[in-house]
Amino acid sequence: QVQLVESGGGLVQAGGSLRLSCAASGRTFSNYAKGWFRQAPGAEREFVAAISWSGSTVYADSVKGRFTISRDNAKNTLYLQMNSLKPEDTAVYYCAAAQTIALLYRSDYWGQGTQVTVSS
C-alpha cells in the first residue's frame, strides 16, 4: 500500500519557521515529481511548491523567497522549509507525487495533511 505521511506542522508566531516532511512508503518515488499544496478553511486547495525528479523547483508567488522545497531520494522524503511565516500561510498542507509537476494536481498519491497555524 502506497502512503504519503506529512509531519512537522504546528503553531508558530508570525515571522517564525517550520519544516514540513513527507515520508513515502510502499513504493519509491525517486523518479517522480513531488509537491506541496495547502488548503485554508473555506478555500480551494492551492499550489505551494514542487520539485521535479531531477531537482528543478517551482514556487507559488506568495511563498517565493520564503519557502524552500527539497527532496532526499535515499530517504524517500520530501521537505518544505518555511521561513518568515505569515498568518495567511495558515492552512492544512498536503504533499503529492506524480510523474510530472504538471500532473500533481490530478495525482493519485496524496498525504493526509498537516496543520500549520501562524498567529499574528
Image: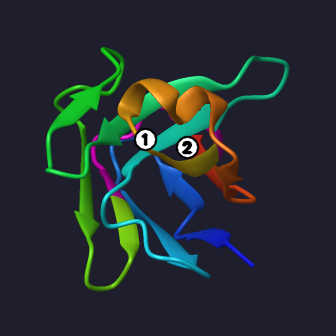
| Along the viewing direction, whichever of 115 and 44 lies nearer the viewer | 44
Which amino acid type is marked by label 2? Val
| Along the viewing direction, whichever of 108 and 56 lies nearer the viewer | 108
Farthest residue to the right: give it. 42
Image quadrant in which you'd find residue 78: bottom left
Per the model, the C-alpha gap separating discs 1 and 2 is 6 Å
Residue in the picture at 50% in, 29% down: 103
- Specify few, some or many for label 1: CA neighbours under 10 Å numbering under 14, 14-19, or 20 or more: some
The residue carrying mark 2 is 118
Q: Which stretch is magenta?
A: 80-92
Does 24 sit above or below residue 116? below
| Along the viewing direction, whichever of 12 and 3 lies nearer the viewer | 3
Residue in the picture at 67% in, 52% down: 110
Which amino acid type is marked by label 1? Ala
The residue carrying mark 1 is 14
x, y (%) of residue 72?
25, 73
Does 39 sit above or below residue 93? above
